[in-house]
Image: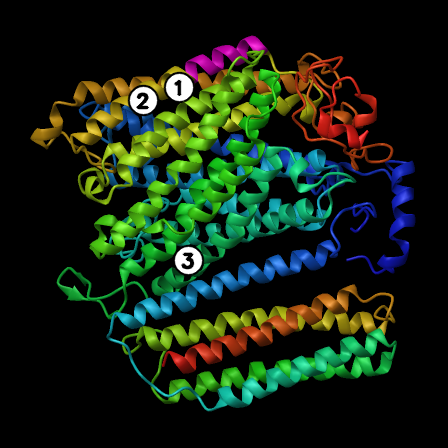
Amino acid sequence: MSSTDIAIHQTDMHHGHDEHEHHHDQNFFEKYIFSLDHKVIAKQYLFMGIAWAFIGGFMSILFRLQLGWPEATFTFLEPILGQWVQNGKLDPEFYLALVTMHGTIMVFFVLTAGLSGTFSNFLIPLQIGARDMASGFMNMLSFWIFFLASVIMFISIFLETGPAAGGWTIYPPLSALPQAIKGSGTGMTMWLISMALFIVSQLLGGVNYITTVINLRTRGMSMTKLPLTIWAFFLTAILGLLSFPVLLSAALLLIFDRSFGTSFFLSDIYIAGEALSQTGGSAILFQHLFWFLGHPEVYIVILPAFGLVSEVIATNARKPIFGYRAMIGSMLGIAVLSFVVWAHHMFVTGMNPFLGSVFMFLTLIIAVPSAVKVFNWLATLWRGNIRFTAAMLFAIGFVSLFISGGLTGIILGNSALDIQLHDTYFVVAHFHLVMGAAAFFGMFCGVYHWFPKMFGRMMDEKLGFVHFWLTFIAVYLVFMPMHYVGIAGFPRRYYNWTGFEAFNIFTDLNTFISIAAILGFAAQFIFLFNFIYSIFKGRRATLNPWHSNTLEWTTPINPGHGNWPGEIPAVYRWPYDYSKPGAAEDFIPQTVPFSQTQSSNLPQERVLE
Amino acid sequence: MVANIDNNTTGGIHPLKFSLWLIILSIVMMFGAFTSAYIVRRAEGNWLEFDLPQMFIINTVLIILSSVTMQWANNAAKKDNLSLVKIMLALTMLLGAGFLFGQLSAWDNLVQNNVYFGGTSSNPAGSFLYVLTGVHGFHLITGLIFLAIVLMASFKYKVHSKNMLRLQLCTIYWHFLGGLWLYLYFFLQVNH
């Protein structure tokens, strides 16, 4: 905190800042490592997210190998996995660890930190017209605590007893008792420490995002002139702020159960005929606490993708977003509802059927705002002047995945149907389509679209097309068959299913899914190559390569710290004036006052001239 | 650090103050989780009933007094009565430390009454009490650190009517910690 008299000197300091951008030379560490600049922090999050995504993706390939070829020997994996492969067979406990870490990494480290961390940091100040986040220091702290959490989680993978293996939902008693499974030993301890740090990091980030959106908008940028991206990031941060502390509470109680002999979640457990000392705990209590975070978490993952996709679709369809206020309203509705549906993850825990019905109704209501959003995206695309850029393809792909994944949500939300489908591959298919693949598509869409603003260069469009089509096809080839085996009752998290008569018939289908998964994973290396190559050798970007309306394109091609060299531009209109009848061009940036666009002003806008 | 805060921004409240309210909100959610877990768990039975330590009453008085002195320091700074600011801040710290000390002796008292945090003879009823007071105590320590920083600044004449932000933030946080304890105390009285 600066010790100067803030109230008096604020204005003066600011002018100094405006006039010469870099009044002192930053050294390498200040500029690229411990940077306070939101754009650098965003890139740091992006690089970490991509690194984690490849680790998490590679893990899924490992367990898909086991599922696709259950009888095969994997001696060729010994060089990487060492003792986890015994006589060419994957260790069953290591399989569980792989599944757990794949979930943890993808949900938290990639799609929460990597997605929100990158785009909230990058776009919030640029699109609302602020020089940086409300607190650059807290922002930097947020990233480095996340980095520390990442390091701890990464080291846990290499423990002799393996990383956490109780599933990403870490239900006790399995996760609480080291005697139960190797992964519940040191691996679980490190998981909890890493996640506690992760939560702190997300809270610091979220506080900053909310404060910045509320306090630092430029002149004229009212809440109803904000791009939908900002609305999405804003609501995401609020969800995180309200739900992550609850997970911290649950994690803390679990830590006490594991290390201090309390019995919050443990009761009447016998191991090898010996009763444990803990009595009086409730394992279901943990599930309530976990899913109170866990359900908002899936919206923390998907809301930023909503925002990015809305922006990209409007820009590339050259049409105003259909139902701007309905889009905000539906996001608000989803955000509120996300807090009152958590128990639909727990229909089979023996809960009161009446309570189950209440949660079922609340869950099904989410279909309404979700359908509003889908309708609005399709209506925006309808008869638009569509430009199929790589980002646009991923945005349309997102809408497709969100529809196909969302429909099965209506099925799973029914407490009666869930009894059959619970913990089968139907669930796996549902959430991978609707929040896994869809959020990834949102992320890709964001990276392709804002890459020129991040690095001053363009990504290769042709490689982008190849990446899109391979990924899109692979995603459907992987997850569509999973619905089918799921309805047949094929359970998730099983290492070996060949011993069950009922599931033996799905061998070919499982092999097919695994081949598709490998294809999809391989396609990501095209993206990685394109990404790294374009940073250094990509075609140089122009100031506003997509002819977009939002404020970030009014900054220099490579904006410095402070974003705008001169004064921050004021905002006069909403961000979706695309193809407005009577306008000279098919886009009118937010910074153009109505007085300059008299030919295109609508009757109600004449008074603003 | 405040260089990025423009004077043409929209909100009326200072961004750091707003951030503090958000942090407070997240702490509220954390205690909301603990206390609702407490209620859910208690309803399931097998719940040890015991008397709350007598110290809690004294501690409650201490923390209310510390809020009074904190507010006093805040008002004194507004009137540029700098020596009173220092006295009141120091008094607040003393009262806060006294509260923490009292909480420790309350724990001592609990152990003497065979109410344990963990181990074979513990019950979630006792464990929850330790967690609620412990996590509150942890936040109170962060409040004391914040107070110490403001106190040091006041000795360097950096706390006065034209430089109130730091003191205001500290006051808000301290009142919140007091209010949080009152809530917890009330909650424990009712659900016991």
Q: In the figure, residue A404 lies in which quadrant?
A: top left
Q: Which residue is nearer to you in this view: A341 or B133?
A: A341
Contact between labelled residues 1 and 2, with CB atoms less than 8 Å apart: yes
| First in sequence: mark 3 vs mark 2 | 3
Looking at the rendered structure, whether the residues under marks 3 and 1 are on a common chain is answered as yes
- Under circle 2, the secondary element is helix
Q: Is residue A199 left or right of residue A70?
A: right
Q: Main secondary structure of the magenta part?
A: helix
The tag earlier along the polypeptide, 2 or 1, is 2
Residue A135 vs residue A435, the one in the foreground? A435
Q: Is residue A109 visible?
A: no
Q: Nearer the viewer, mark 3 or mark 2?
A: 2
Rendering colour mode = rainbow
Q: Nearer the viewer, residue B126 or A68?
A: B126
Q: Which residues are magenta?
A: A461-471
The x, y position of residue B6, in whole percent, is 81, 46
Label 2 sits on what residue type?
Val
Q: Can you give x and y, in whole percent of width and height, for residue A18 in the image? A: 88, 38
Cα–Cα gap, marks 3 and 1: 34 Å
Q: Which residue is mark 3?
A: A251
Q: Is residue B92 above or below residue A400?
A: below
> Measured from the top left, where is residue A449 in percent x and y?
61, 22
> Local crowd at mark 1 within 10 Å, few (<14), some, or many (≥20)?
many
SS label for mark 3: helix
Mark seen at residue A520? 1
Q: Which residue is mark 2?
A: A478
Work out whether residue A360 can be spotted. Answer: yes
